[in-house]
Amino acid sequence: MPELPEVETIRRQLEPDLVGRRFDRVEVLDHYFSKPSSASGFEQAATGREVTDVGRRGKYLLIEFADGEAMVIHLRMTGNLVLVDPEGHTGPGDARIYRQDDGTRHLKARFHLDDGGELRFTDPRRFGRGFIAGPEELDTYFAARLGPEPLSEGFTAEALATASEGRTAPLKSFLLDQKAVAGIGNIYADEALHRASLHPLSPAGSMKPDHQSALRDGIVAALERGLDLGGASIDDYRDARGESGQMQDEFLVHRREGRPCPRCGEAITRIVVGGRSTYFCGSCQSRLRRRPRRKKA
Ligand SMILES: [Zn+2]
């Protein structure tokens, strides 16, 4: 599933090519994409709109319009957005186009642009969704679902302290909770915990200030590394030009069971936490104990 670095990579690629463009014609080819809105209702609402900005909140992409409304797209498991230029090319050069993914397989929606180009949404597993909403509706929607943006200035060790206070859930599950921190998924949770030298089964509320600060730094470093490498392509993720990211070649622990820890050399372990494969080093990621509650006199 695309996480923050993958979605942000797509956002950065879409922005220069979409801002100032108008959706001349919109086709929803699979009504799952616009659920619960009907395909024709969505097509009508999106047609004729001019894109003024391309934003992101957590793992959501926001294609913003002049009146403050936005089209929100969540890629879920296997959604991809692919840009096609007016000449029909998907990548900056043929050698870099991912062969299998020219944006026509599993095509679910297409947005015809006023310059002759096209934005295509493809999704083999059909979990991806798009909807259009106004600014107030969006504020309410995100406030109910998302915690702080980890790459924003407001994301501090104190923000993590507040979010984790009193929580007994393992750190791995805590990081996957979008209300705790927005945008982190299975890959970057493992990578962040290794960078912070914290065991994934440590109760979230057991962190002391130095752990909170290490985790904050670990999250930011793991996400920035992913961004620098154009995201990770372990499943279906391709960027908006149909290319793979490189982050999967640079994982510290994720999907590296039995391989040496890059910090201490011990073998990396795989366990399952909350149904998700979790990779860590049992030697240098310390397991915190639950802090005993002091009885009030
Ligand atoms: Zn280690």
Image: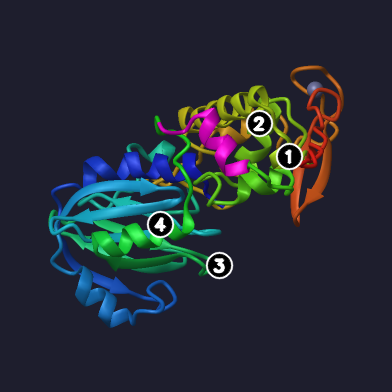
Q: Which residue was labeled with disc 1?
A: 255
Image quadrant of residue 50? bottom left
Which residue type carries mark 3?
Answer: Arg
Q: Does the magenta stretch include residue 160?
A: yes
Query: Which residue carries the number 3 mark?
Result: 125
Disc 1 is placed on an element classified as: loop
Q: Tag 2: Cα neighbours inside 10 Å, few (<14), some, or many (≥20)?
A: some
Magenta span: 154-164
Q: How crowded is mark 3: few (under 14 residues within 10 Å), some or many (20 or more)?
A: few
Instruction: Name the quarter showing ligand 1.
Output: top right
Of residues 94 and 164, the one nearer the viewer is 164
The earlier-in-sequence mark between 2 and 4 is: 4
**First of labels 4, 3 by sequence position:** 3
Residue 70 appears in the picture as rendered: no
- Image coordinates of residue 286 in percent, x first then y, are 80, 27
Could you tell me residue 165's position as x and y percent?
63, 42
Question: Marks 2 and 4, how far apart in space?
Answer: 30 Å
Q: Which of 241 and 47 is in front in this view?
A: 47
Image disc number at residue 142:
4
Q: In which quarter of the image is residue 290?
A: top right
| Tag 3 secondary structure | loop
Q: Which residue is drawn at 50% across and 41% down?
A: 244
